Image (spheres, rainbow, N blue to C red):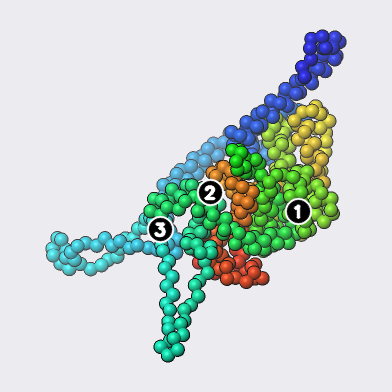
Amino acid sequence: MPLAYDQLPNDAESLKRLVLGKQELIARLTDEIARLKRWRFGRSSEVMDAAMPQQDLPLGDVLEVPPTAANDSHPAPQSEAILRQDSARESSKDTSTKLRRTARVFPAHLPREIVMHAPAACDCPECGGSMRKLGEDVSEMLNYLPGTFTVIRHVRPKLSCVRCSKVIQLPAPSRPIERGMPAAGLLAQVIVSKYADHCPLYRQQAIYRRSGIDLDRATLAAWVGQVSDRLDPLVVALGRYVRSAEKLHTDDTPVPVLEPGRGKTRTGRWWTYVRDDRPAGSAAPPAVWYRFSPDRRGEHPQAHLKDFRGILQADGYAGYGPIYATGRVLEAACWAHARRHYYDLYAINKSPTAAEAIRRIGLLYAVERDIRGQLPEIRRQIRQQRSATILEELHAWLSATLQAVSAKSPLAGAIKYTLVRWTALTRFVDDGRIELDNNTAERSIRALVIGRRNYLFAGSDDGGERAANLYSLIGTALLNTVEPYAYLRHVIEHIADHPNRRIDELLPWHVAPLLAPALCQAA
């Protein structure tokens, strides 16, 4: 609360401390407002400016430039002339290269409609002689036919024996939805349009109406729910596979959930668990498993991961604490989250100290680029040779900087965030399976966020759970470069008659060889 005039101290030192405290509060709140504005309206990229003038740095933060780089930044006059000539030569070469246009080759699996443009007469228009073929010029144009509906008519003849009157008729084939009219292709199209292409059901209703088919939005929603329920055993199998990994990436994102009868929404949560060890040279298929919860209480990820043993790479959410406390799960923190605190400061006020922190963290990412795809043991050896030294210097610099800044400043908060999680942040050095950051999980969240911006909210908790199931199958198909429509159509066609004990055979990497090769590459 603001102090009244008679409550203010009379001595100068107390007034100075009061003013400094107010200034720190104003600066902190100003930074927070700027950060929120950037998150809401600014660009999402966290790329630094290409260069930062050295004069903007305080004396203690001057970047050290290697002698060779310093010499190269001030070339001799003769060298400058040579560089200008080479630059002009390269520029003209690039321009001529851009002017030459290469013909676009369309995929071979696309059907071709051949239109022949031949002269009406085969005689020479000049002398009337006969013509012979010299060759032909062929060019291709890409066309598009809007999605079309077809009707599948199942006919089951009844046969009767002429002697004993025995009647024989084959049983009716199973349907994706019991006694329902949609075939597997239509159901797959509706689901992929909503959860892969982010087209809400009311927009699909309008699209289908243009083809003369009136499908009510409630009907489409009922189909989606019934298909999700039928695919639930497959999602359970996918969850088992994901949690059998040695390392998982996890994150969460909010989703508004409609409260019927109250005219408003409450905030639910989608959780993502990603198994993807390809950066560590693993040949195991990647997979993503989404879960829904009505709130963000820590009991939900604890229930999701109750049988998991291994490494969990996540942000600093306190709800993961009890999972780490069991001793069966090892915490690995995210350098992207740590870096983001410094980037926010740099984006707000171009803080040179924050820029130096970003530069030092960037050295770790340079090492990771060199070892991406290598086996864990090779990654561990190179990290211990190169990254360990960078981390030692970074820790010493952060500790010294923390002593020189105000304890209540945003910069101090960013440094404390890093130092408090230092053990979890540096665990990757001694374990080649761990990634430097949790961007794998953040990428998996992107589809949820784009979809949420289009359909705005989930209709109920059941709707959130069904969406998580369908997002899981589509996301896993895309991770394995399997076209989601072809995959879901195959699964919906076969799951009703597929033995439940062999449900794993319907996971994307097992179905991919049964699909057209072009569809497995198109994703």
Q: Which amino acid, by three-letter code, is at mark 1?
A: Ala
Q: Is residue 375 visible?
A: no
Rendered-image quadrant of the C terminus: bottom right
Is residue 266 at all visible to an observer of this figure?
yes
Check disc 3: other Cα within 10 Å, few if <14, some if 14-19, many if 20+: few
Q: Position of residue 272 (x, y in %)?
A: 67, 51
| SS for dot 2 | loop
Residue bearing mark 1: 303
Q: Nearer the viewer, residue 1 or 133?
A: 1
- Residue behind mark 2: 198
Which disc is residue 148 wearing?
3
Amino acid under label 3?
Thr
Residue closer to the observer: 312 or 451: 451
The quarter of the picture where the N terminus appears is: top right
Q: Position of residue 353 (x, y in %)?
A: 73, 32
Q: Secondary structure at mark 3?
A: loop
